[in-house]
Amino acid sequence: MAEFGRATTIKASGYDRVSVADCRLRCQEIRPLLFDFNGVMPAGELITQARFSMAVPFCVAMASPVIPAARRSAQITITAAWPGEAWIRCQVTTASGKRYSNQVRVAVYGPGPIYGDQEPVGGPFELIATAP
């Protein structure tokens, strides 16, 4: 389950590694999407790289990949472009070479761009963030 606040937060669980979180947005919404890996990483483990990917990037646009200062999560900004569904995977690599991933299903609702809205473009297929 995704949590809503200033960002939509997707929490990885060490107890249920195959769960997929759901996020529902209306067309034209722009929202930070934070993947929190605290529940699966050992204490002291730090993320060095995060790779965000979509198999079919038509209804959601990804931008601004970042690894926050604590280096236990990874974040992008998403724009709900067109009605439909997108599956976004975040795969992180840690300083010790371990790799963890989590997924979210983003469902976009509503009519496409109306009211004279600019037509957003979905994509890209992949974004990468590297820790400083």
Image (cartoon, rainbow, N blue to C red):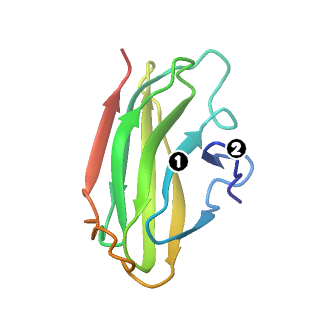
Residue 104 is situated, as x and y percent measured from the top left of the image, at 54, 60
Q: Which residue does the image show at 28% across and 67% down from the upper left?
A: 118
| Circle 1: residue type | Leu
Q: Secondary structure at mark 1?
A: strand
Q: Are marks 2 and 1 in contact (CB under 8 Å)?
A: no
Label 2 vs 1, first from the N-terminus: 2
| Circle 2: residue type | Gly
Tag on residue 14? 2
Tag on residue 33? 1
Q: Is residue 72 above or below residue 99?
A: above
Residue 23 is situated, as x and y percent measured from the top left of the image, at 60, 64
Q: Secondary structure at mark 2?
A: loop
Say which of 127 and 100 sits in front: 127
* Residue 14: quadrant of the picture: top right
The N terminus lies in which quarter of the figure?
bottom right
Q: Which residue does the image show at 45% across and 76% down from the upper left?
A: 85
**CA distance separating discs 2 and 1:** 20 Å
Say which of 3 and 116 sits in front: 116
